[in-house]
């Protein structure tokens, strides 16, 4: 879903009925809002003419670590909201959420490692572990060596700095 709030007119009653934007999210708040809006039964009308322009700069909010961390929070929210929702060929998490976000989570995990941001590493690892049962076997198999090699690097570089519980969570990623 790629709906830009700057190109939309939204009825105030509909906005308020679905709870507006989730303030925990700074990035993905629009995806979250529109998903809740459409699930509540509101419809949309598409006008096939450009009404706004969207530009991305290196200083854009979509390029910040806060935005990437928001992706992790959004994935966790989606996992909670859609765990039992059925999709066209089975489970919605397996068909839509896991394939969309696994790369995003891996990228954020590696960025967090480079920043030595252990809290974000933990969130990314926990989210990847939560997605793993929903990933296709091939994707799970590809994640295993990557996670193992990276876990060994992290263990070697940060063994003294990382609390034991975080190492255990990283181990869960490697084992799964």
Image (cartoon, rainbow, N blue to C red):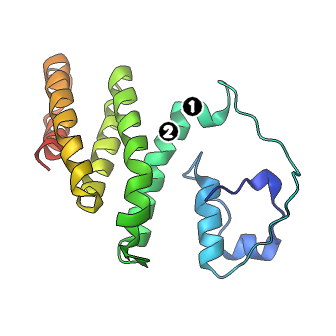
* Residue at numbered disc 1: 64
Nearer-the-camera pick, 127 or 142: 142
As drawn, which residue projects farthest toward the bottom?
Answer: 41
Is residue 125 shown above or below 58?
below
Which label belongs to residue 146? Answer: none
Task: Give the percent coordinates (x, y) of residue 71.
Answer: 48, 47
- Residue 1 position by quadrant: bottom right
Residue at screen point 17% across, 30% down: 151
As drawn, which residue projects farthest toward the left?
Answer: 175
Is residue 72 shown above or below 11?
above
Is residue 18 shown above or below 102?
below
In the drawing, does residue 142 fall left or right of residue 155?
A: right
- The 10 Å Cα crowd at callout 2, few under 14, some 14 to 19, many 20 or more, is many
Which label belongs to residue 68? Answer: 2
Residue at screen point 23% across, 60% down: 133
Task: Give the percent coordinates (x, y) of residue 125.
Answer: 28, 43
Residue at screen point 77% across, 40% down: 54
């Amino acid at each position: 879903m790629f709906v830009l709030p700057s190109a939309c007119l939204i009825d105030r009653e509909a906005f308020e009925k679905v709870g507006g934007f989730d303030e925990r999210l700074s990035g993905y708040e629009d995806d979250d809002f529109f998903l809740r809006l459409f699930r509540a039964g509101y419809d949309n009308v598409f006008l096939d003419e450009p009404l706004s322009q969207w530009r991305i700069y290196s200083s854009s909010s979509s390029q910040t670590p806060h935005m990437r961390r928001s992706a992790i929070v959004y994935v966790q929210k989606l996992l909670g909201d859609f765990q039992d929702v059925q999709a066209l060929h089975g489970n919605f998490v397996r068909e839509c959420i896991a394939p969309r976000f696994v790369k995003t989570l891996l990228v954020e995990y590696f960025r967090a490692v480079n920043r030595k941001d252990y809290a974000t590493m933990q969130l990314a690892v926990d989210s990847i572990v939560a997605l793993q049962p929903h990933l296709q076997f091939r994707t799970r198999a590809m994640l295993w060596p990557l996670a193992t090699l990276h876990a060994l690097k992290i263990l070697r570089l940060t063994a003294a700095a990382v609390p034991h519980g975080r190492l255990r969570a990283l181990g869960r990623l490697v084992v799964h």
